[in-house]
Amino acid sequence: MMVSSILSGAVIAVIVVVVILFFTFVPVGLWITAYFSGVKIKISTLIGMKLRRVSPGKIVYPMIKATKGGVDLELESLEAHYLAGGNVNTLVDALIAAERANIPLQFERGAAIDLAGRNVLEAVQVSVNPKVIETPNISAVAQDGIEVVVKAKVTVRANIDRLVGGAGEETIIARVGEGIVTTVGSAKTYKAVLENPDSISKVVLDKGLDSGTAFEILSIDIADVDIARNIGARLQTDQAEADKRIAEAKASERRAMALAEEQEMRAKVVEAEAEVPLAMAEALKSGNLGVLDYYKMRNLNSDTDMREAISKVTDSNDNKKTDK
């Protein structure tokens, strides 16, 4: 009796362990939920997901959501998208939103957008409810040299067909900024820009700036226009200052050349004066100059030096009297 009771207890324990392992490995509760939600799925399919290291709940619950939302999807497609690294739940939400808004969005297109790194649900929402992109302050200069600072608001709608491979918001902002700079730069005066700010938006909008982007530009509205610096006057002032410095440099160069030439002439005079005593000695030696002639020349030089000294003293006294 004791042996039979031990065997029966062991059998019951084994059965309990098997049942626990079965309900742990096989998501029966998830299968029951899917069945009563209208999603026909086999137990073997759920076990296969477990073996492929796929969380069944991340596939089945979005499948239930899609079924209730009226979107016809294949379970294998959702599992393949999950294994590829996509966000199954977000993709299903986007497909349901597109179905409700009558936006033609196929599963393959939505999966490609999601795998490309874009938020497919946000793209559908922006396609239904347009988004406003505000540009930073954009500086442009009119032809009269006045700087104009413009801020614009760009209303865009997501283009589902161009989300894969299309440029983003940064490209839209850059192109709008380029269009504003070109339009303001072609204006004759800044007053024309202030009087007709809508002309900027019209010209920029006609340029087709949304080409190759993931958005469709609906409107461009000028939010603010401010007057900044007088760039033309500043450039003229800088040019005048530069011309002044060039003229001063050339004048300094001419003064230096004149000073060098004067010093050179003085050196020649000194050199010539140094040769005078030698010439006089040679003349005395050769008899071409007499002794009396030599002394007369010396007296003449002395008189000349005396007159120069007197003239300097006289000029100095006259200057003092004038100062008084």
Image (tube, rainbow, N blue to C red):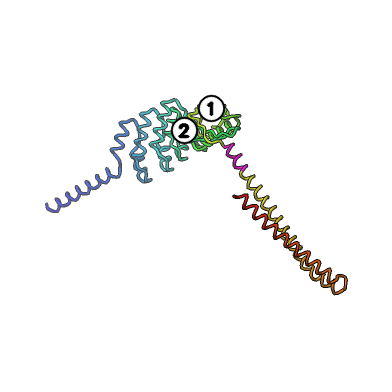
Residue at point 72%, 62% (across, down): 306
Q: Nearer the viewer, residue 95 or 143?
A: 143
Disc 2 element: strand
Residues in magenta, as a range: 231-240
Q: Is residue 30 left or right of residue 150?
A: left
Looking at the rendered image, the disc whose residue lies closer to the viewer, 2 or 1, is 1
Any part of residue 166 in sight: no
Q: Position of residue 174 (x, y in %)?
A: 53, 37
Q: Earlier in the sequence, mark 2 or mark 1?
A: 2
Instruction: Label the magenta part by its dominant secondary structure.
Output: helix
Residue at point 80%, 69% (across, down): 295
User: Which residue lies most toward the right here?
Assistant: 287
Q: Position of residue 111 (x, y in %)?
A: 45, 37
Disc 1 element: helix
Q: Which residue is mark 1?
A: 194
Residue at point 50%, 38% (across, down): 170
Question: Three-letter amino acid code at disc 1?
Answer: Leu
Q: Is residue 2 above or below residue 214?
A: below
Please tell me how crowded label 1 is: few (under 14), some (14-19), or many (20+) other residues with Cα within 10 Å. some
Q: Which residue is mark 2?
A: 134
> Is 152 covered by the magenta stretch?
no
Q: Is residue 280 above or below residue 45?
A: below
Q: Is residue 67 above or below residue 247?
A: above
